[in-house]
Amino acid sequence: MPAPHGVILPSLLAAPVLAGAIWAALPTAPSGRTITHYVAADEVTWDYAPSGADRISGAPFDGLGALMMTSAPDRIGRTYRKAIYREYTDSGFTSLKPRPAEWEHLGILGPLLRASVGDTIRVVFRNNAGRAYTMHPHGVFYTKSSEGAPYEDATTDADKADDGVPPGGTHVYVWPVPERAGPAPGEGSSVLWMYHSHADEAKDVNAGLMGPMIVTARKMARRDGTPKDVDRELVVAFAEMDENESWYFEDNVRAYTDTARIPRGVTFAHPFYLSNLKETINGFSFGHTPGLTARQGERVRWYVFSSTNFEIHAPHWHGQTAISRHMRTDVLNLFTMEMAIADMVPDNPGRWLFHCHVAPHMKAGMSSTFEVLAPVAVRN
Ligand SMILES: [Cu+2]
């Protein structure tokens, strides 16, 4: 005697739902490529304004710029010891992978990790720095052994190895890219996520350890993973680097100042503290972000995000408009660690200001230029 429909039907309906939940929870993508990157945390000396002058005003630093970018016995100046993510060619971690010219603008950011929905990002992470760091991704799928953040999460042993990779250590992070890491219905063809170190989140990120990921909808991805309906991609972090909060603060004080003249325990109100709040676009201030270029008529996608401090930014383009969040605009808004996308077809050639519209940030150098080049000649 068959069971009444009222019994059979719910169980049939429940089966695919349960199976879907189980598949979604598995750490490997059901199809697609596994893309491996070799990424190290490297300690470097970073210069926020390599020309030594204010490239926005075209004049020597003065006012707040002089406070922030000029070294003195009681100021660190414009160069700091930092830790950044850099990509290498292979597991030997001896040869840096060259950054293509179109990605020069990434500046201090780590390598662009790119995937399409269904792929898996695999990062072999080498910690070349002098203290424990990690890689913690946003948006993509991760199990406890690939989260890159230490906290009491009821895990043990191998699931803790990602929580803080010691100096000289290596850890493999595996991040599947399921549908929920790709564009939502109604969104464009690709999305931005970031990754950053999360051993001690604020100190790690202010030391410099952050980078971008782009995920493209599978049907919208070219063979190289770039979105088919975009000609030029630009990734820009409006990032306050609070050097007072960096792991390397004491190192920098010792290396660049007369330590006896450095006040201790000061806060925002003190000029020394302010001088260490670097307002940057991809780690550069006062017009030094290189390579922000596109051609007139190109379909340009801007991926914009912010950093970990008490940040409010208002990225503003001169000379062009964009569409972001279904609205035509020329100003975005970002809170802490917010990610936003804007699509633009530049129609107005020339060198244009691209800056944070929050006045104190602009005064402190959160400005760059965006160059719209002549269109490529089309042959008929
Ligand atoms: Cu700002």
Image (spheres, rainbow, N blue to C red):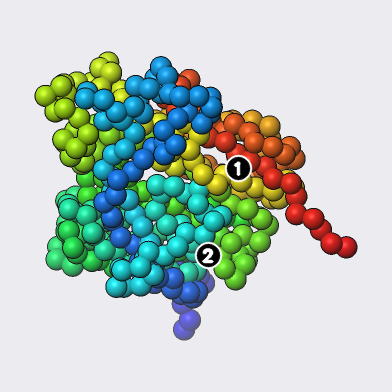
Q: Residue furthest left?
A: 260
Residue 211 seen:
yes
Q: Of label 1 and label 2, which has the lower sequence position?
A: 2
The percent coordinates of residue 120 (x first, y second) are: 43, 69
Residue 379 sits in which quadrant? bottom right
User: Residue at the location (44% across, 47% down)?
Assistant: 107
Q: Amino acid at mark 1?
A: Ala
Q: In the picture shown, does residue 126 fall above or below 370?
A: below
User: Residue at the location (74% across, 46% down)?
Assistant: 374
The residue nearer to you, when weighing 16 against 174, is 174
For the residues bearing labels 1 and 2, Cβ distance under 8 angstroms: no
Q: Amino acid at mark 2?
A: Ser
User: Residue at the location (56% across, 65% down)?
Assistant: 225
Residue 203 sits in which quadrant? top left
Mark 1–mark 2 Cα distance, whole angstroms, equals: 19 Å
The residue nearer to you, when weighing 4 against 380, is 380
Q: Residue furthest bottom?
A: 1
The percent coordinates of residue 24 (x first, y second) are: 42, 66
Q: In the picture shown, does residue 43 fall above or below 322?
A: below
Q: In the picture shown, does residue 69 fall above or below 226?
A: above
The percent coordinates of residue 220 (x first, y second) are: 63, 63
The percent coordinates of residue 22 (x first, y second) are: 38, 69
| The C terminus, quarter of image | bottom right
User: Residue at the location (39% across, 20% down)?
Assistant: 64
Q: What label sits on residue 211 in the rendered view?
A: none
Badge 1, how many Cα within 10 Å: few under 14, some, many 20+?
Answer: many
Left or right: residue 234 versus residue 35 is right
Q: Which residue is mark 2?
A: 116
Q: Which residue is mark 1?
A: 342
The residue nearer to you, when weighing 264 against 33, is 264
Helix, strand or loop under label 2: strand
